[in-house]
Amino acid sequence: MELTEEQYRIINSTGNIKINAVAGSGKTTTVIEYAKARSKKSRILYLAFNKSVKLEAIRKFADNGLNNVKVETAHSLAYKHIVFNKGYKVRPQGYRTHEIAELLGLRGNGEKHAEYIVANHINKFIAYFCNSDKQKVQDLNYLDVISDSKATAFVTAYYDYIENQTRLLLSKMDKGEIGITHDFYLKKFQISNPGLQYDYILFDEGQDASSAMLDVFFKQKATKVIVGDTHQQIYGWRYAVNSLEKADYQTYHLSTSFRFNQDIANLAMGVLKWKSHIEEHKPLLIKGRGTTQDHKSRAILARTNLGLLLKAIEHITENERVKRIYFEGNVNSYTYADEGTSLYDVLSLYNGNRSLIKDKLINEMKDLNELEDYVDKTEDVQLGMMVEIVKEYGNKIPKMIKALKEKHVADDEREKAEMIFSTVHRCKGMEYDTVQIVDDFITEKKIEKLKGEHKDELDIPKLNEEINLLYVAVTRTRNNILIPEALLPRGISHSSRIRIVKAEEADRKENAERNFKSAILRAANKEARKGRVYSVGEVRAKHQDAYEPWTENLDDELTVMYSEGVSIKVLAKHFRRTKGAIRSRIKKLKLEV
């Protein structure tokens, strides 16, 4: 690839620098060329954003003969310094809310589920502290990251207790009494003030760095290069900070995108221009030099799980010929929260099927209203999303997920998928030939409305991040984009690369549900046509357990298998019962419409 003048300036630079790179601008190529231009004897550390980026970077540096470059993630670096040396045991999945309540012996004071609400905030306080650059928990005010009025009122009333218990749980980890989390050993690494023996440190995806890792980076004696895109910061909810704004280094730019052409570049700039409604915004120039005409990979991108699941159902019911789909991060990740709570547990609470609820926290809730109150007081976004999905679709959910799983291909067959589905957070760093945007992102009209109604109360960082989410989504395409009319920036029109989708939200939902029901009916009729008639004796001989009573354990097993998309035929064989008996039990358990 022919390098641009901007890239040459970076490669020939000296001293600490920061690089603000637009999407698809060849920042990895630039960093590789920067490393090539340094002495072979130079010790270079490249810090990647996550494990998949790390593995790709290792391959690229090796292909270029750069054996003097060590590639790590922030966590892999911290792990080697802390876990190996201290002998800690890591608890990779972290601690669930009910586990924290039990570990600390938390008790409520009469307020419903107070111990679990406190435990939830302790978990978040720990994450907030561990990702910060502070030395002590007391150096932070946890209320600074709470926005909901109910959550604020609760935390204010319990603040001292929450802070003390947060310190106690961290102390238990530090002493090795319990397993440590990934966040904990990264924090321990930062507090230890490590000296990294490198001549150059290259920090990628700087816009999503934690303050803890940024503190380690800034304190090193090496020549430092930090690269990222200010407008791709979308992890503020994980306490990430935009390090490009914090680094007082010489600034360089990569403003030419080799991913897409000028039409898409104009669209991206139009989205970012929305920021001028809420604060002073310096326009960003993006030059689009992409030339691909490929249509091999197609993706549908949404802001939320709910928006994505709805669009996925709509897509497979309206396009019967679609046989293979793929969800970035696997379809199962869209039905489980980070803490492990299942969408099916929330559905069982909705139906009053308490015996089917596996999650201890959900089982403590009387009904969905109590769970919603818990969500309000904890600001548990993922659990709140599950509640919304259950309220929207109820007992249609098992069949909806089943229909998706039947068409889902394995990771090693991803390239065979006719459509890829993803939320923006899960497709960060990815690119596709054609991208379709779901209409669940913020709009310019909504921003203007918020500005008019809440001028002095705007959460500017949050609104900027909402705009960034749409920017990241539109810049995933290499070729074409389908975008809802409501999301189209003013001054941008239909072109050979931009197709405007004008369907109304209400019509879309109605059509999706109607087509979904029709698909289910067609599948049922097809199943009936394939069947044959058996005598009573044959049925009894073939299904030995058909007349045995269903136990609680059998019901649990059936619920899990059916929810995971196992077919009626396989279920009948597994439980040694007739397909009719399986369908009857599924109906009894309210697992389908």
Image: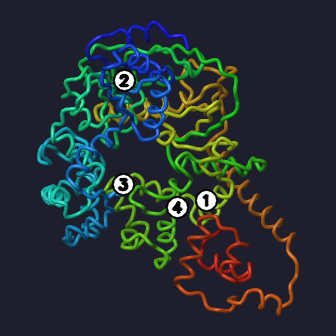
In the image: residue 493, left or right of residue 213: right
**Residue at x-position 30% and y-position 50%:** 182
Q: Amino acid at mark 4?
A: Val
Q: Earlier in the sequence, mark 3 or mark 2?
A: 2
Q: Regarding mark 2 in the picture, which secondary structure is present there?
A: strand
Q: Position of residue 266 (x, y in %)?
A: 55, 18
Q: Position of residue 407 (x, y in %)?
A: 68, 54
Q: Are marks 4 and 2 in contact (CB under 8 Å)?
A: no
Residue at the disc numbered 2: 227
Residue 519 higher or lower than 469, as above or below: below
Tell me the quarter of the image containing the C terminus.
Answer: bottom right
> Looking at the image, is mark 2 or mark 1 nearer the viewer?
2
User: Distance between the Cα atoms at labels 4 and 3?
Assistant: 16 Å
Residue at the disc numbered 3: 380
User: Distance between the Cα atoms at labels 4 and 1?
Assistant: 12 Å
Q: How is the image coloured?
A: rainbow
Q: Regarding mark 3 in the picture, which secondary structure is present there?
A: loop
Q: Regarding mark 4 in the picture, which secondary structure is present there?
A: helix
Q: Earlier in the sequence, mark 4 or mark 1?
A: 4
Q: Amino acid at mark 2?
A: Val
Number of residues whose C-alpha sits closer than 10 Å to that of mark 4, classed few (under 14), some (14–19) or many (20 or more): many
* Residue 390, disc: 4
Q: Amino acid at mark 3?
A: Asp
